[in-house]
Image (tube, rainbow, N blue to C red):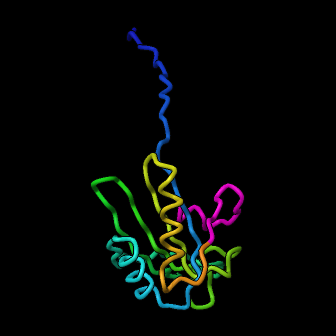
Amino acid sequence: MKNVQKIKRIQLNVEDNEKLLLCGIVSAEPDYKLSLALNKKMGISLKNKSPLNLSDESGNEISFSRFAYSNHSDDVVYNLISNRSGKQFLLKKLKNIDYIFQVHFPGSDNASIKVTSLIRETEAVNAVFVIDTSTLNDKNLQYIIQ
């Protein structure tokens, strides 16, 4: 007979230090102009990346534009995603929002306050809303929070 070793499970306690900030932006400007205005105001460099592609109920593919920037010195990642594609919405429950600005940053709680105030001060932005992901129930939210 073979000597079978018993598998032992080890539970790892991983502390989740990464914070996620989701802001809804209302702006009449096209995505490239908004990204340029945010770059100038925040001192970042959002660049056009591959769009977020989803399928609707009838199987048609929908593309939502995406601009991204990651700062390797402090591990902050910025994403600007369009909430509209023609008459379709990425987050259907937030139809009044034109863009979703997503920031992944480790640690600091003050960073979210600083980011939202910088967005509010941007000329191309009409309004900014902080999106609470725990209360928002939308099936496409999983594509934004990765």
State the predominant SS element of the stretch in magenta: loop
Q: Nearer the viewer, residue 69 or 116?
A: 116
Residue at 49%, 86% in the rendered image: 124
Residue at 59%, 74% in the rendered image: 128
Question: In the figure, 56 relative to 102: above or below?
Answer: below
- Counting labels gives 0
Q: Nearer the viewer, residue 89 or 61?
A: 89
Dividing the picture into quarters, in which one does residue 96 lie? bottom right
Residue 70 falls within the magenta-colored stretch: no
Residue 134 falls within the magenta-colored stretch: yes
Instruction: Residue 34 in the image: state x and y as whole percent.
Output: 45, 84
Instruction: Residue 38 in the image: state x and y as whole percent.
Output: 42, 77
Instruction: Residue 135 in the image: state x and y as whole percent.
Output: 72, 58
Residue at 54%, 75% in the rendered image: 120
Dividing the image into 4 quarters, which one contains the N terminus? Answer: top left
Residue at 61%, 68% in the rendered image: 140
Image side of residue 39 versus residue 21, left or right: left
Q: Which residues are magenta?
A: 129-146
Question: In the figure, 68 relative to 11: above or below?
Answer: below
Dividing the picture into quarters, in which one does residue 3 lie? top left
Image side of residue 9 versus residue 46, left or right: right
Instruction: Residue 101 in the image: state x and y as whole percent.
Output: 51, 70
